[in-house]
Amino acid sequence: MKKSDPFIVETQYYTCCDPPDELVLQSGVKFGPITLAYETYGELNPEKSNAILVCHALSGDAHAAGYHEGDTKPGWWDVVIGPGKAIDTDKYFVISSNVIGGCKGSTGPSSVNPDTGKPYGLSFPMVTIDDMVDAQRHLIDHLGIKKLLAVCGGSMGGSQALAWSIRYPDCLQSAIIIATTPCHNAQQIAFNEVARQAIMSDPDWQEGDYYGKTIPARGLAVARMIGHITYMSDQSMEKKFGRKLIGKERLGYDFNQDFQVESYLKYRGDSFVQRFDANSWLYISKSLDYFNLKAEQSLVEVFSKARSSFLIVSFTSDWLYPTYQSKEMVRALKSNDLDVSFIEINSSYGHDAFLVDNKEVSHILSHYLARISKTLNAV
């Protein structure tokens, strides 16, 4: 394939955990069957040693790279994944799956409950990051892969990579943790709760039973607007919008939109409701708040279970998951004499910096994966 050729991909589906072999969730609930939507890019080598699992953030999905037939926009991390790119699909076999609780093909609250023939809604069980990883483990087993070269992700994707390194330490060679925290602090939980309240306060939410009816578009749009503000930085918003007005020379002195940033946020909110389920936002954001590596032990004790190498990346302008949270993990990993590389990248894009076309991110990923591959081949 030439680098200029369209990178056409298809979503696949895997179903596991049929009764009586349901997945035992962290809450103690047994749940199944579970379907995972996933995509793969590249070829698995004969040794099955070149597989990389890419995990998505809160609003992501299985479509990480390439184009679906007829699409005009590629997957959410196409700047990084593909032939000749940082995660080079000419070298690596890349797997990307939609998490359980999602709404893009994997089993979630909008899925049909086989026992009732109706969408689960709020009867869907609460899921955690650990549960998402346990379901992914079934998929990796299905693909016949005993050890992943890397588990990689940013934001919530990084949380999943952290969980992999603790729950299945012998099943991955390396963990790539980008713009991630070992647990949410009070401010991070607070932002998520305000977004959840925006959804649940929408009269159309109807206690989660809105399927086949009017969706809670207003609440979900506001939730997305709140989230998007936290994903950007003061610098990026000032550079992009400042106090520019919308096609006018003076203020309107009313409650119509005057500023470009107002119009932009409304656009982001309105477009989001067309592709994402409100209940999934509630469940997934709650799973992030529940994630806590320090719940029962210190980070040093928790990481004593890990066996993989680690690459941890943070960004100077990320005020949602600031660098001090990454450094806390680095110190705990080093206390366990683990192989850990850390870099703080100077970027004005805020928390979303890992999603944009960043040459430094690509350079770091490319060289780190090459080093890990070389180390593995030398064993």
Image (spheres, helix red, strand yellow):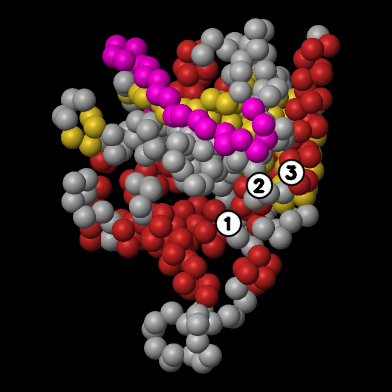
User: Which residues are the magenta region?
Assistant: 1-28
Q: Is residue 359 visible?
A: yes
Mark 3 touches mark 1? (CB < 8 Å): no
In the image, 185 versus 172, the foreground residue is 172
Query: Residue under circle 3?
Result: 361
Task: Give SS at disc 1.
Answer: helix
In the image, 302 versus 276, the foreground residue is 276
Task: Decide which of tag 2 and tag 3 comes sooner along the chain.
Answer: 2
Instruction: Compute the Cα span from label 2 to label 3.
Output: 7 Å
In the displayed orientation, state which residue is furthest to the left. Answer: 116
Left or right: 208, with 28 as reference point: left
Magenta stretch contains residue 15: yes
Disc assigned to residue 40 = none
Q: Residue at x 63, y 69 (%)?
A: 240
In the image, 153 versus 286, the foreground residue is 153
Disc assigned to residue 231 = 1
Instruction: Compute the Cα span from label 1 to label 2.
Output: 11 Å
Q: Main secondary structure of the magenta part?
A: loop
Mark 2 touches mark 3? (CB < 8 Å): yes
Q: Residue at x 31, y 21 (%)?
A: 33
Query: Residue under circle 2?
Result: 354
Residue 71 sits above or below residue 205 on the image: above
Picture quarter with the N terminus: top right
Q: Residue at x 62, y 76 (%)?
A: 242
Circle 3 residues within 10 Å: few <14, some 14–19, many ≥20: some
Task: Decide which of tag 1 and tag 2 comes sooner along the chain.
Answer: 1
